[in-house]
Image: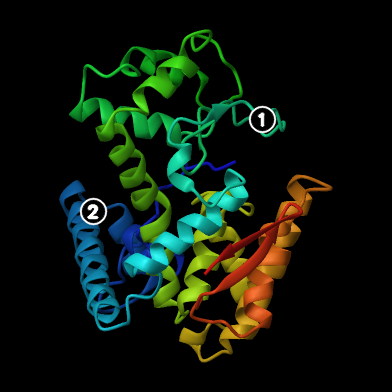
């Protein structure tokens, strides 16, 4: 369901991502000079890359300062808990998200996900589960999942179970009883999905609801730059509507983003239930609940959920 191995731009807005890749023009700014630079010595090229990196770091520091002056929004403890409940109602059909550390199954949806597991739906076929186990094994090399790392690397990018059956699911459930692995799942969820989504939403001028809209989209579509990934969806939405940070209407932009997201969901899986957009996020938006104030009532796949 989510692919995170293409370009990890989690903490970096796409609109600024080019700063890391582009070589700044020289003071003359001429095409001839640029052409000469491209064929110059390795030291010159290295210096240009270093300059680009320095500029990017300066921009990130400026962004950090901007975010530090903003309200916590979805990052406030109570709102973050609410966000996990909302996502869990879609991912695990319960708001009790902490019951899902040990969940693992192959849902067989044809998306190449393989096994989907844990609190955010880490997948053996989409790289995020592999990253989780690799990082966890660095800190805890004797864990019960470490022996499956060769197989996880081999099946990454496919729905294959080769080398995982029959013991991997039992090993996952057993490891999920270990507090350190539960902490690792939460840390990886935050690192890959929650923190990048909230950061970028704040830079786009979005309030708490908009931050959740980005987070849920990041979870479902993955932090990719392709057309189906989160960053691709954001670029498409921005082509149709201005973000509040660009002087646009927050409600209008979010309506556009949800339209784009729903189209992408339906294009990828015709007939998919789009409850997480239609009877949750659109409901909050229509009510003008831009700060996700409780109580909240929403529907997911025909079930009604309430948070007082």
Q: Write down the residue under mark 1.
A: 107
In the figure, residue 24 lies in which quadrant? bottom left
- Please name whichever residue, 237 or 249, is drawn nearer the observer in this view of the structure: 249
Horizontal and vertical percent position of residue 44: 19, 55
* Residue shown at the point (51%, 31%) measured from the top left: 103
Residue 66 lies left or right of residue 247; in this view the side is: left
| Label 2 environment density (alpha carbons within 10 Å; few <14, some 14–19, many ≥20) | some
Please tell me which residue is depicted at 46% across the width and 15% down the height of the picture.
170
Q: Vertically, is 90 above or below 202?
A: above
Instruction: Report x, y in % for residue 12.
Output: 37, 62
- Which structural element holds mark 2? helix
Of 303 and 181, which appears nearest the observer? 303
Q: 275 or 202: nearer the eye?
A: 275
Query: Measured from the top left, where is residue 254 in percent x and y?
Result: 61, 76
> Which residue is at 47% across, 61% downward?
83
Q: Position of residue 35 (x, y in %)?
A: 36, 61
At mark 1, the secondary structure is: loop
| Left/right of residue 206 with respect to residue 271 in the rendered view | left
- Can the viewer see residue 221? no
Q: Locate residue 305: give its quadrant.
A: bottom right
Q: Is residue 44 above or below residue 156?
A: below
Q: Quadrant of residue 152?
A: top left
Closer mark to the observer between disc 2 and disc 1:
1
Per the image, the residue denoted by label 2 is 45
Q: Earlier in the sequence, mark 2 or mark 1?
A: 2
Could you give the CA–CA distance between mark 2 and mark 1, rounded to whole angstroms? 48 Å
The residue that appears at 39% across and 14% down in the rendered structure is 148
- Where is 306 relative to 88, above or below? below
């Amino acid at each position: 369901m989510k692919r995170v191995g293409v370009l990890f731009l989690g903490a970096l807005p796409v609109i600024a991502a080019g700063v890391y890749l582009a070589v700044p023009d020289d003071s003359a700014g001429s095409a001839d000079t640029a052409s000469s630079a491209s064929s110059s010595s390795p030291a010159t090229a290295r210096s240009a890359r270093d300059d680009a990196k320095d500029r990017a770091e300066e921009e990130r520091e400026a962004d950090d300062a901007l975010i530090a002056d903003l309200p916590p929004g979805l990052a406030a403890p109570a709102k973050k808990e609410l966000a996990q409940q909302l996502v869990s109602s879609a991912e695990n059909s319960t708001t009790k998200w902490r019951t899902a550390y040990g969940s693992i199954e192959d849902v067989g949806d044809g998306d190449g996900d393989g096994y989907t597991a844990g609190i955010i739906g880490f997948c053996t076929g989409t790289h995020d589960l592999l990253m989780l186990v690799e990082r966890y094994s660095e800190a805890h090399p004797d864990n019960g999942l470490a022996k499956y790392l060769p197989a996880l690397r081999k099946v990454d990018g496919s729905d294959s179970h080769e080398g995982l059956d029959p013991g991997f699911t039992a090993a996952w459930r057993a490891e999920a009883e270990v507090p350190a692995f539960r902490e690792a799942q939460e840390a990886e969820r935050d690192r890959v999905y929650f923190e990048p989504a909230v950061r970028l939403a704040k830079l786009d001028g979005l309030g708490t609801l908009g931050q959740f809209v980005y987070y849920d989209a990041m979870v479902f579509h993955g932090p990719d730059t392709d057309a189906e990934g989160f960053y691709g969806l954001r670029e498409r939405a921005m082509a149709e509507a201005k973000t509040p940070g660009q002087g646009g209407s927050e409600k209008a932009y979010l309506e556009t983003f949800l339209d784009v997201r729903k189209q992408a969901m339906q294009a990828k899986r015709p007939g998919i239930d789009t409850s997480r957009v239609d009877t949750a996020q659109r409901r909050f938006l229509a009510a003008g609940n831009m700060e996700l104030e409780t109580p909240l009532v929403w529907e997911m796949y025909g079930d009604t959920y309430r948070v007082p």
